Image (spheres, grey):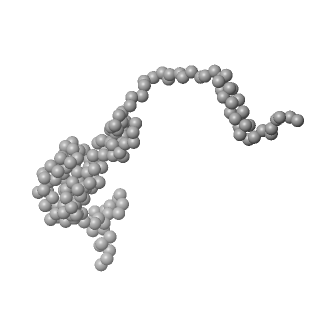
Amino acid sequence: MSDERPARPSDIARAALEAARAASAARPQPTRRRIAGPRRKWTGAGPGADDPQPLGRLVDSLVNEQDWSERTRVGAVFGRWSALVGPEIAAHCAPQSLSEGELLVVAESTAWATQLRLLAPSILGKLHAQVGGDVVTRLRVVGPTAPSWKKGPRTVRGRGPRDTYG
């Protein structure tokens, strides 16, 4: 009779583990290589440059990198017109164009155009304070224009199509 017992699953697992440990000990250990370059500096408790940033800060840095600051200030005049001049004034006029520092504002009536011409220095002061002094240097206010009967590049002097009605 043999004294051998059948192998139990735990004995097989133990033998496999010992064989894996022996093979690992016989294999040479890899050496850690240092990567050339600056070492990472830990930022500590405060936020660092590689941490997630607020969207506004990222947009501001993009505007500065691409040199879009002048365009964004011009866009701010049109986009924030109501906040810049106030809701009462903005309800009766709108900015039309901005070229070479002159802002063209169209009023809804001739009375409002006259009022806005009187308020022009204070409106310019608000624009200088909130947008920047070099964006808008002059303010030109015009009233509403009458509809034109001219429909093309060629016109004829005189009453035009209205003289055939009667």
Q: Quadrant of the N terminus?
A: top right
Where does residue 28 sit, x and y in percent of width and height?
63, 21
Whether residue 86 is situated above or below residue 63 in the rendered picture: below
Tell me if 31 is positioned left or right of 37 in this view. Answer: right
Question: Whole-percent x and y of residue 5?
Answer: 80, 38
Number of numbered discs:
0
Name the residue nearer the viewer: 7 or 76.
Answer: 7
Q: Is residue 122 left or right of residue 47?
A: left
Q: Is residue 107 visible?
A: no
Give residue 40's quadrant in the image.
top left
Task: Judge by depth and name the residue closer to the eye, 50 or 131.
Answer: 50
Specify whether residue 30 is in view.
yes
Residue situated in front as seen by the camera: 111 or 120: 120
In which quadrant of the rendered image does the C terminus lie?
bottom left
Which residue is outermost to the right?
1
- Residue under the point 33% across and 46% down: 56
Image location of residue 17, percent across then percent down: 68, 33
| Residue beneath the point at 36% across and 36% down | 48
Where residue 91 sits, quadrant-wise, is bottom left
Report x, y in % for residue 49. Answer: 37, 36
Give the farthest residue toward the bottom. Answer: 166
Q: Nearer the viewer, residue 147 or 35?
A: 35
Identify which residue is drawn at 35% across, 57% down. 153
Q: Residue furthest left?
A: 118
x 36%, y 33%: residue:
43
